[in-house]
Image (spheres, rainbow, N blue to C red):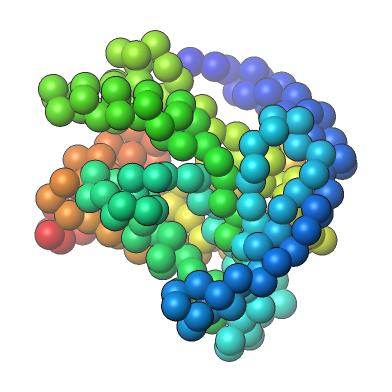
Amino acid sequence: MASLGALHVMAIYKRHIYMSELKERRRVVIPVRAGNVMAEFISFSGDNTEKEHIAIHFTGKQKTNEIPLVRIHSECLTGDVFGSGRCDCGEQLDEAIDKIDIEAGYILYLRQEGRGIGLYAKLDAYDLQDQGYDTYQANEMLHLPEDDRDFAIAAEMLKAVGVTQVRLLTNNPDKALQLTQNDIDVVEIVPTGVHVNDHNRQYLETKALRKNHTLDTEKLKKQS
């Protein structure tokens, strides 16, 4: 496990990778939810990782706060596109669209499938989970990081669109920590809902117990 000092150095290193080179490339308005929601998709140039991260801007139908509501969402093909019940990603994305469309803000859609290990490796990890390993143990069995996501790029995306203060929609304390380490002021953390079913209950409990995600474990046991 990396020391706090090593994590701090890593955060500084990631910040220097992106520097202030990240810039808006293009803004395009796209109707989503069958045209019921109008969202502005923003692409960027200057990202040395060459991943095509996207910011999605919502102007807000009932905007009451000048500080934008922001959701950092890592790509999940199985959950976001196919509605997989093994995670809560699709439900969290839907919740973010609903809330931010009302309150105004951004979804930062990061191309970090499978907590950064990629789609094929995620499927390999699912196979191990079917054998009894939890989501983090499965990664370890594959000699992969438990969580290889980088949220420093999200901070640079926010700066590129002129945002330095956010209300963060999340249950993951690491997202707030990495934003703060990269000069974004997280003025409020807005918890996401608990989207539990029989297929993802153990996965959510594991995130709460091992990574301190702010999920009510009793609520996880009661919901179905």
Q: Residue at x 33, y 45 (%)?
A: 78
192 vs 156, nearest the viewer: 156
- Judge whether residue 216 can be spotted in this image: no
Answer with left or right where residue 153 lies relative to residue 121. Answer: right
In the rendered image, the vertical position of residue 48 relative to residue 108, given as above or below: above
9 vs 110, nearest the viewer: 110
Instruction: Tally the marks.
Output: 0
**Percent position of residue 146, x then y:** 41, 25
145 vs 75, nearest the viewer: 75
- Judge whether residue 116 can be spotted in this image: yes
11 vs 113, nearest the viewer: 113
Q: Residue at x 15, y 28 (%)?
A: 130
- In this view, the residue farthest toward the bottom is 62
Q: Residue at x 48, y 15 (%)?
A: 1
Which of the 4 image quarters holds residue 41? bottom right
- In this view, the residue farthest toward the right is 20
Placement of the C terminus among the 4 image quadrants: bottom left
**Percent position of residue 107, x then y:** 58, 60
Q: Residue at x 70, y 59 (%)?
A: 42
